[in-house]
Amino acid sequence: MFTGIIEEAGTLLAVNRGAKSSVLTIACDKVLEKTKIGDSIAVNGVCLTVTTMTKAGFTADVMAETMRRSGLGSLQKGERVNLERAMAAGGRFGGHIVSGHIEGVGTIRAIEREENAIWYSVEADSGILRYVVEKGSITIDGISLTVAYVDERILRVSVIPHTQKETNLTDKRTGSLVNLECDMIAKYIEKLMNTKASQTEREEGITEEFLLKNGF
């Protein structure tokens, strides 16, 4: 589990691409502290497993499903990526519950400054935005942010200069892709409600009214 509080922005040193998967090599510093092979690190919000380590960075495998779901496949050598280690037991919970399993990607459509805030407007699929609510939480490239506005096509967030400076948001431009993870609570509620509705339909499927209507 992660919190969406970015620890540092690393640099992508290499992308070794296979037919459908890839291996990322990332230069970093802070997230290597107390990290060992097999640990999880969120890279632009995507939970990846550390496969090798050096004093200056680590490598992680990206499987085909992750390549399809995320924007990791479009990363280029030299790009900065947001990094966060999995939350330690007893650690501070500064953001919100983040799984590192993203829904998909969005596209930045506008970046606007308003005094000490920077507004990002992100276009996304309606299947993602259905789980987004105003003043709720959204993870954008691994960053825990508060939704300021949402409709059927766009979500907007307001970012303070410190967050922009300490993450890869400062590198983003109009048209940039970002990984999106919605608050998982909404998905659990939807699943439970659908399950309950289906169960009720099964229980009430054969009634006296149903039998009479069908000639019994």
Image (tube, rainbow, N blue to C red):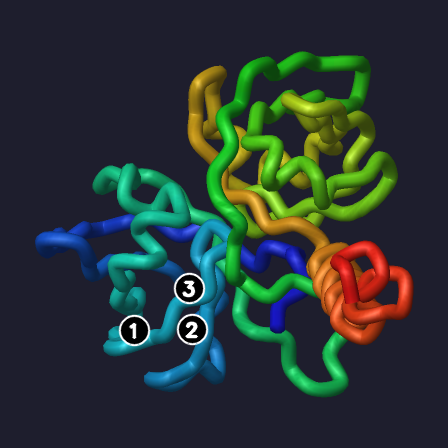
What amino acid type is highlighted by mark number 3? Asp
Say whether marks 2 and 1 touch (CB < 8 Å).
yes
Q: Where residue 51 sits in the image (x, y, percent)?
A: 27, 77
Q: SS class of the residue under badge 3? A: loop
**Residue 55's disc number:** 1
Say whether marks 3 and 2 touch (CB < 8 Å).
yes
Q: Quadrant of residue 54?
A: bottom left
Q: Residue at x 73, y 30 (%)?
A: 157
Horizontal placement of 115 versus 101: left or right? Answer: right
In the rendered view, tell whether residue 42 sits above or below residue 140: below
Gap in Å between the C-alphas at discs 3 and 1?
Answer: 8 Å
Q: Where residue 75 sits in the image (x, y, percent)?
A: 29, 40
Answer with mark 3 or mark 1, whichever residue precedes in sequence. 3
Gap in Å between the C-alphas at discs 3 and 2?
Answer: 6 Å
Q: SS class of the residue under badge 1? A: loop
Q: Mark 2 points at which residue?
A: 32
Crowding around mark 1 (Cα neighbors within 10 Å: few <14, some 14 to 19, many 20+) is: few
Q: Name the residue under label 3.
A: 29
